Amino acid sequence: MSNEMIFGIHAVKAVLASDPARFIEVFVLKGREDDRLQPVLDELNMLGITVQQAGRKALDDKAKGASHQGVIARVKAGKQYNENDLDAILAGKENPLLLVLDGVTDPHNLGACLRNADAAGAVAVIVPKDRSAQLNGTASKVACGAAEVVPLVRVTNLARTLRALQELGVWVVGTAGEATHDVYQSKLTGPLAIVMGAEGDGMRRLTRETCDDLIKIPMAGTVSSLNVSVATGICLFEAVRQRQG
């Protein structure tokens, strides 16, 4: 199992809460005094995890220029999920909400979508193995800890996985510009998977054809589309609103 770097207070706190055995070493900015960071450092020290002080340039180099908030950790890679894990993830869930990303290749967008999924109570985020951003330090940082708690399921064949979900009674709704009705007119209750396509290209043809329903977000301005993580948030939270109602 490979090691990975995570950075930012939220990402470090999330690993601390979910699986502290993953920590190998932690680097903190020399002289940094931060009320949010200190309890994290205290807990790491209590667990006997090595915390080393480092200069800003050393931290910047480790984070490859990404924003690290003065803390970086080298951790063992988290659990990797694939299609064989979906039965266990869905077991006992009465009305599961899933997010499917078909071709989101920017780690910033992947991280933001994971954060949205966690906030909306989604049980998993499903991505194709070959057309998706990696869950790297950048994605984890943007996810603000969600990457450590929401299973990211990488599947070999997305259309086949969607058909398997349909056989389990999950309604699969895709987002597409050519949809005839919008997100606010659609039924988003019950076991549900919301499929978001790549920015620009949208969903692939086979993914689109597998969906039970297609919806769109009504657009009033001059721009023709939204950033995928913003669109994801809108669709997920409309589902949340309907499910609470």
Image: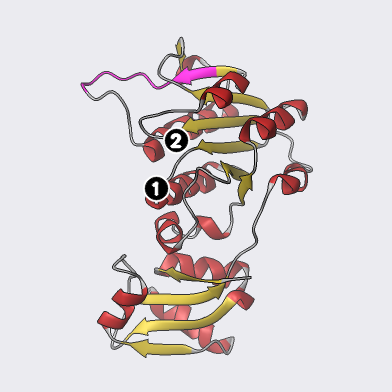
> Residue 8, how many percent across, how many down?
39, 68
Residue drawn at 74 percent across, 40 percent down: 93
Q: Main secondary structure of the magenta part?
A: loop
Which residue in the structure is indicated by mark 2? 232
Instruction: From the image, state whether disc 1 or disc 2 is nearer to you.
Output: 1
Magenta span: 214-222
Q: According to the image, what is the colour scheme of the structure?
A: secondary structure
* Residue pointed to by mark 1: 106
Whether residue 35 is visible, yes or no, is: no
Q: Is residue 199 visible?
A: yes
Which amino acid is tagged 1? Asp
Q: Quadrant of residue 18?
A: bottom right
Mark 2 secondary-structure assignment: helix
Q: Secondary structure at mark 1?
A: loop
What residue sits 33% from the left and 31% below the top? 226
Task: Report crowding for label 2: few under 14, some 14 to 19, many 20 or more residues within 10 A (C-alpha).
Answer: many
What label does residue 161 carry, if any? none
Return the residue nearer the eye: 161 or 168.
161
